[in-house]
Amino acid sequence: MKEKILIAEDEKELGKAIKAILQYSDYDVTVTTNGQEALDKTLNDSFDAIIMDIMMPVMDGITALKEMRKNGVNTPIILLTAKAQVDDKVEGLDSGANDYLTKPFNKKELLARIRAVTRINNSNKEKFKVGNIMFDKENSKISSETSEFNLNNKECEIMEMLIKNQERNISYNEIVKRVWKTEEMEESSVNMYMSYLQDKFQALNANIEINKENGYVLEMKKI
């Protein structure tokens, strides 16, 4: 399966050039022209890497980056900067960017940076440990020392969201938008999938649970 790359670049000719380079290197490429479009894309689809210019209309790259991280998007992000944008580079890295490239750049360097961030991301994203439960994303399983359960696609996506956002409550609307790719769905359907996961946690004698008092958050069981 081709790796998916999102480009956010308002200079249309540069965007086309980067797209051509990546497509020639067998990547699946999506192009957006401002930060808001890029943010919307990441909230509705998944990518292996994002290449994002800092200076863009509607929403600049730094703001888009911060919003992505705030919404649990952990995709590696490479910022495109001008030579004079030293402060923006620092702010971008502090806000969660993985790397940056200064314009103009060499296509070999661009491809090398993409390979580097996706390699690191792929090595870290397959298994997650929370409490006494291991989540194997690649094989769609959760397990404890005593047993394991397979997860269906929706359970797997919900589990990943819960694990990556353990510090905050995730709203019903956010889950529907990210997992079901829509904005309209009965809340009872979301609760049904949460119950499926809770039942599996109980069967695994897990020391974690899903708190549904104010949105949804994965937390340690209270003793």
Image (cartoon, grey):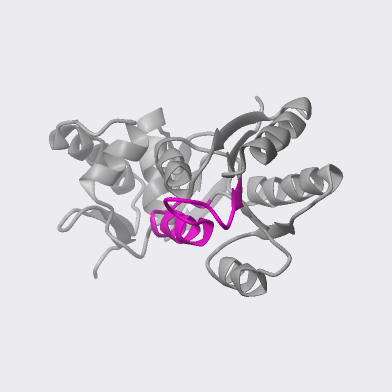
Looking at the picture, how far across and down is residue 9, in whole percent?
Answer: 59, 44
Residue appearing at x 41%, y 57% in the figure: 67
Residue 97 drawn above or below residue 116? below
Q: Quadrant of residue 194?
A: top left
Viewer-nearest residue: 37 or 77? 37
Residue 102 drawn above or below residue 177? below
Residue appearing at x 28%, y 56% in the figure: 217
Q: Is residue 63 magenta?
A: yes
Looking at the picture, how far across and down is residue 136, in whole percent?
Answer: 52, 42
Q: Is residue 198 visible?
A: no
Q: Is residue 63 visible?
A: yes
Viewer-nearest residue: 169 or 85? 85
Residue appearing at x 24%, y 68% in the figure: 222
Classify the position of the C terminus by image quarter: bottom left
Magenta residues span 51-74
Looking at the picture, how far across and down is residue 191, in whole percent?
Answer: 19, 39
Q: Quadrant of residue 93?
A: bottom right
Residue 156 drawn above or below residue 198? above
Q: Is residue 31 magenta?
A: no
Residue appearing at x 59%, y 50% in the figure: 52
Classify the position of the N terminus by image quarter: top right
So how many labels did they put on this image? 0
